[in-house]
Amino acid sequence: MNDVYLLTGGNIGDRLLNLQLAIEQIEKHIGTVLKKSVVYETAAWGVTNQSSFLNQVLLVSTNLPAQKLLQTLLDIEQQLGRKRIEKMGPRTVDIDILFYNNEIISSPRLTVPHPQIANRRFVLTPLNEIASGFVHPVLQKTITELLEACPDPLEVKKHISVNKPI
């Protein structure tokens, strides 16, 4: 089995419901969700003139190889209404592969670890909640160390309607 860290997020429609539906589809088509962070809210990153995002990190155990995992995640995004119109634009759901075991993967369709992890507080904050001691296989720093050094100034706060992980 493979341990995979995924980031789910979205800023269109019922954001919390969309994250819950993503978890259901991940459990149906990919594997067992072993850990979930609480849900966090953050202003949009990159293209900033859009609604704020809800984000959550999941640890999933899967037997899918990395490329098949990517395709399955893209299929789930599409089933949940994702339309790829504008890079970093608004979306119902986005599911990114952060880590696939401790592997380093570089292909035309997939780069793992996700290349922007160290630069995005909205990724590191929920990741630190469930995997603080995980060592980034390229940067050789723990998630806590990456969060402490993160240059991203955006505030990441727990989503107020959520008191526990969904």
Image (cartoon, helix red, strand yellow):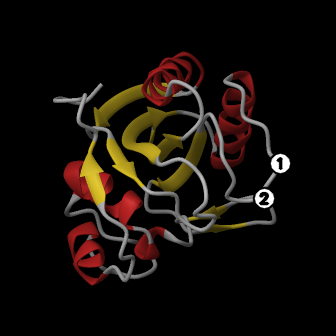
Q: Residue furthest front?
A: 49
Q: CA distance from mark 2 to mark 1?
A: 18 Å
The residue at the point 28 percent across, 35 percent down is 35
Tell which of 68 and 86 is nearer to you. Answer: 86
Mark 2 vs mark 1, foreground winner is 1
Viewed as shown, does residue 113 lie left or right of 160? right
The residue at the point 43 percent across, 69 percent down is 120
Q: Which mark is residue 109?
A: 2
Element marked by disc 2: loop
The residue at the point 72 percent across, 26 percent down is 81
Asked if residue 7 is positioned above or below residue 48 in the image, the reply reads: above
Asked if residue 99 is positioned above or below residue 165 in the image, the reply reads: below
- Of the 4 image quadrants, the one containing the C terminus is top left
The residue at the point 75 percent across, 59 percent down is 87
Asked if residue 157 is positioned above or below residue 37 in the image, the reply reads: below
Viewed as shown, does residue 124 lie left or right of 116? left
The answer to which image quadrant residue 155 occupies is bottom left
Viewed as shown, does residue 152 lie left or right of 165? right
Tell which of 105 and 94 is nearer to you. Answer: 94
Q: Which residue is mark 1?
A: 85
Amino acid under label 2? Arg
- Of the 4 image quadrants, the one containing the N terminus is top left
